[in-house]
Image (spheres, rainbow, N blue to C red):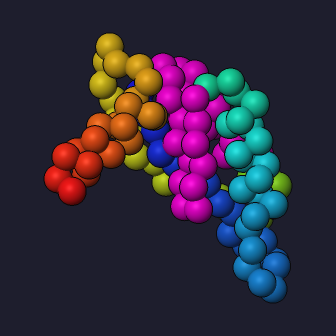
Amino acid sequence: MLVAFSVAPSGTGRADGSVHDAVAAAVKIVRDSGLPNRTSSMFTEIEGEWDEVFDVIKRATEAVEPFGSRVSLVLKADIRPGHTGEIDGKIERLETALNDHA
């Protein structure tokens, strides 16, 4: 499965509203997991089996908890049994399609 998620605290008490320290704590958990992953400005994607992916997301969410009075978690999953390497495969197929239509 491939899961895109965003986790961030609210009620941080920071005047600038920044959450980068909290997001860094979450992304560190993901990167240390050893699972294929990618982080962009809005989401982190992670690929693996149900239990391992959701364990990492749970731990990433828990890493954000100390930074605010509540935590927001947004998830989107692509569940495609029997397929691996989709974190890169989907992008490669998109780029091929774009090049074919150029």
- Give the left or right position of residue 6, taking residue 89 as reference: right
Residue located at (72% from left, 56% from top)? 23
| Range of magenta residues | 36-63
Tell me where residue 92 sits by quadrant.
Answer: top left
* Residue at the extreme bottom: 15
Is residue 50 visible in the rendered image? The answer is: no
Tell me where residue 9 sits by quadrant.
Answer: bottom right
- Give the left or right position of residue 90, taking residue 7 as reference: left
The question of residue 87 being in magenta is answered with no
| Number of numbered tags placed on the structure image | 0
Residue 87 image offset from top left, x and y in percent: 45, 34
Residue located at (54% from left, 61% from top)? 42
> Is the residue 80 above or below the residue 18 in the image?
above
The image quadrant where one finds the C terminus is bottom left
- Give the left or right position of residue 42, taking residue 9 as reference: left
> Is the residue 63 above or below the residue 92 in the image?
below
- In this view, the residue in front, 95 or 41, is 95
Residue 76 image offset from top left, x and y in percent: 40, 46
